[in-house]
Image (cartoon, rainbow, N blue to C red):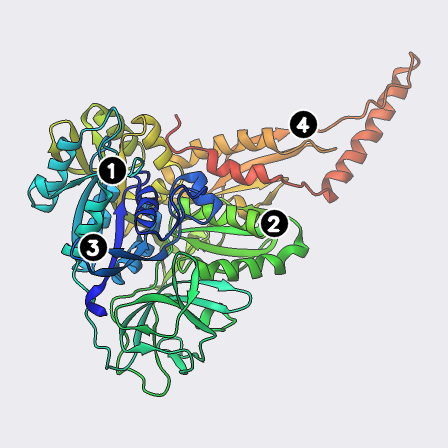
């Protein structure tokens, strides 16, 4: 049985046709009927289809009769394609023995392709190179096949050329999976060890863990144990994905399937844990999993304070499907009670925000994102802060250290100048370059993460007409000349609008923010001053003019002293109102911090 199992993944850059290839494999193996109305079968979320990118890893089991007459079980573990979901890719690859490296015949090798390929090689996976979209008028199959061959150190003849859309040469891919990818190793007689590489929450079955059985057998009546979490449970159901959930009697070594645990709390079934038998536990858990580390932090607050509990429940359920999401309660003077959430990147943050609004029907305010800083205090202590509001007073700080990343940008040579200009505007340091082909260049930079998270990717795409791609790795913390930029509205600091910026940027950013907020905050019955404050000094100010009632409307002529008396009375009223009046700040104002682009002059 084990000899005829193949566990594989498809790794590719965004929009290189990964989900379409998965659809064709499912059709060719008879797992779904040809012409199934929904395309991208494995992308079950509306968001995945809209954005053309796989967000969650998913699994499907196929049966394929190969040319040698044997029937093989092929387990496709689909992986996300965006740079933010690097951790999910690594988890899915840990459950495989091989990977299809899919490259678009018109786009060629891109940054994400390389990053995911290195992850696959770290896991010792067998790589099957495939060039897709050979049907496009702009396709360069031979050129791109040569690029891929050079990258892997193989002959260009070993690269399979396909059109997933038209279904051309799909059989070649299936035969390569059977012949080139080794069967799973593992001892069916050893104590049970199953790797949890994903999970979702089911209201009837509890936490459903997606597992790859490495050693032993999972049976329905056997009590099980999560080795890191310590939770014991009896499975509610075990089964495989074909492609919907289908119960089976047992999962043997080498197989991929699911275990419905019945557990009701998110924290009991962590992704990356090892499931073993509660009666005969394994000696040690499976190696290689690490907790994903969030790099972008933002506050999430309900628009209506009574939705706080609903927001907490929604985040708890989302965290189960998304191991990389972290959150903790937070209070803001401006926005009330909410949560400080950690994300893998801006795209991840956008996905979480949209899922909260769509799937859980919540009205939320998300504050401007920030990164985690290290602060060395004058008494020698080092603290970490992920919210600008937590920064200690200036007189206590010795230095502030910010996270830096190694940034790789792949671009056609014609956009060399545009990319250089963009990165140097963001305090990037040029480290070197390579030319994998005569018309493409790989640029290496080092850059502060804070400069990367807001709109760098959008700017890069717009300046290179969508041709450039990027990847980054965390380097470490470095001291920087940083200050806290605060916004005061009506002489009160609004903590949710505070940001940490480079000293040289503070004046320009403050000025732009003040101008933006002046447009967005509605006029009150009294004058509202908006101030940008850095290092205890006001660096920019604007006043929102008061709405004025025409108190002189009823005076037709008459003595001027009467008019003056009415105006004085109005002035006193406004003065009193200003002391007790509260300014409500609309959500657009919090998003304004995002829209003040770093790259704008």
For the residue labelled by badge 4, is the local secondary structure a helix, a strand or a loop? loop
| Spot occupied by residue 29 in the image (x, y as percentages of width and height) | 30, 51
Give yes or no for contact between labels 2 and 3 (Cβ–Cβ under 8 Å).
no
- Residue 168: mark: 1
Q: How far apart are marks 4 and 3 (CA)?
A: 77 Å
For the residue labelled by badge 1, is the local secondary structure a helix, a strand or a loop? loop
| As drawn, 126 above or below 506 | below
Q: In this view, does 452 lie to the left or right of 576?
A: left
Which of pointers 2 and 3 lies earlier in the amino acid sequence?
Answer: 3
Q: In which quarter of the image is the N terminus?
A: bottom left
Q: How far apart are marks 2 and 1 (CA)?
A: 42 Å
The residue to which callout 2 is attached is 361
The residue to which callout 3 is attached is 66
For the residue labelled by badge 3, is the local secondary structure a helix, a strand or a loop? loop
Q: How far apart are marks 2 and 4 (CA)?
A: 36 Å
- At a point 48% along the width and 30% down the height, the residue shown is 512
Which of pointers 4 and 1 lies earlier in the amino acid sequence?
Answer: 1
- Residue 545: mark: 4
Give yes or no for contact between labels 4 and 3 (Cβ–Cβ under 8 Å).
no
Which of pointers 4 and 3 lies earlier in the amino acid sequence?
Answer: 3
| Spot occupied by residue 165 in the image (x, y as percentages of width and height) | 31, 36
């Amino acid at each position: 049985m084990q000899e005829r199992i193949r566990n594989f993944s498809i790794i590719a850059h965004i929009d290189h046709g990964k989900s379409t290839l998965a659809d064709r494999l499912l059709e060719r193996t008879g797992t779904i009927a040809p012409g199934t109305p929904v395309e991208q079968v494995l992308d079950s979320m509306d968001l995945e289809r809209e954005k053309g990118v796989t967000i969650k890893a998913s699994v499907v089991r196929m049966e394929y009769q190969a040319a040698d007459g044997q029937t093989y079980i092929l387990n496709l573990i689909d992986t996300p394609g965006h740079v933010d979901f690097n951790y999910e890719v690594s988890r899915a690859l840990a459950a495989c023995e091989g990977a299809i490296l899919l490259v678009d015949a018109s786009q060629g090798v891109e940054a994400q392709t390389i990053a995911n390929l290195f992850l696959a090689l770290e896991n010792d996976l067998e790589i099957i190179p495939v060039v897709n979209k050979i049907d496009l008028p702009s396709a360069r199959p031979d050129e791109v096949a040569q690029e891929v061959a050079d990258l892997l150190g193989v002959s260009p003849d070993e690269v399979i050329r396909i059109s997933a859309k038209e279904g051309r040469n799909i059989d070649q891919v299936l035969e390569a999976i059977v012949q080139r990818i080794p069967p799973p190793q593992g001892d069916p007689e050893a104590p049970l060890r199953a790797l949890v590489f994903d999970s979702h929450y089911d209201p009837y079955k509890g936490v459903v863990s997606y597992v790859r059985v490495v050693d032993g057998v999972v049976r329905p009546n056997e009590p099980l144990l999560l080795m890191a979490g310590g939770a014991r449970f009896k499975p509610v159901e075990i089964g495989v994905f074909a492609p919907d959930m289908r119960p089976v009697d047992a999962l043997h070594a080498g197989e991929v399937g699911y275990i419905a645990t019945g557990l009701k709390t998110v924290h009991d079934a962590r992704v990356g844990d090892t499931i073993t038998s509660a009666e005969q536990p394994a000696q040690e858990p499976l190696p290689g999993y690490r907790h994903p580390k969030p790099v972008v932090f933002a506050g999430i607050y309900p628009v209506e304070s009574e939705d706080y509990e609903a927001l907490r429940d929604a985040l708890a359920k989302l965290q189960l499907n998304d191991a990389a999401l972290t959150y903790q309660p937070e209070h803001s003077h401006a926005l009330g009670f909410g949560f400080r959430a950690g994300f893998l990147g801006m795209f991840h943050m956008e996905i979480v925000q949209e899922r909260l609004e769509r799937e859980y029907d919540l009205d939320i305010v998300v504050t401007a994102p920030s990164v985690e800083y290290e602060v060395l205090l004058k008494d020698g202590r080092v603290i970490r802060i992920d919210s600008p509001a937590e920064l200690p007073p200036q007189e206590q700080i010795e230095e502030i250290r910010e996270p830096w990343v190694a940034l790789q940008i792949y671009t056609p040579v014609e956009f060399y100048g545009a990319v250089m200009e963009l990165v140097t505007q963001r305090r990037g340091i040029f480290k070197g370059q390579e030319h994998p082909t005569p018309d493409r260049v790989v640029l290496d930079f080092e850059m502060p993460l804070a400069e990367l998270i807001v709109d760098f990717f959008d700017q890069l795409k717009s300046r290179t007409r969508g041709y450039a791609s990027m990847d980054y790795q965390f380097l470490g913390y470095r001291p920087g000349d940083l200050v806290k930029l605060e916004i005061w509205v009506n002489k009160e600091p609004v903590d949710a609008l505070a940001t940490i910026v480079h000293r040289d940027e503070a004046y320009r950013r403050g000025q732009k923010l003040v101008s933006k907020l002046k447009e967005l905050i509605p006029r009150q019955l009294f004058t509202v001053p908006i101030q940008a404050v850095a290092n205890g000094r006001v660096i920019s100010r604007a006043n929102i003019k008061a709405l004025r009632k025409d108190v002189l409307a009823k005076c037709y002529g008459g003595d001027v002293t009467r008019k003056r008396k009415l105006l004085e009375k109005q002035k006193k009223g406004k003065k009193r109102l200003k002391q007790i009046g509260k300014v409500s700040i609309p959500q657009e104002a919090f998003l304004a911090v995002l829209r003040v682009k770093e790259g704008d002059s």
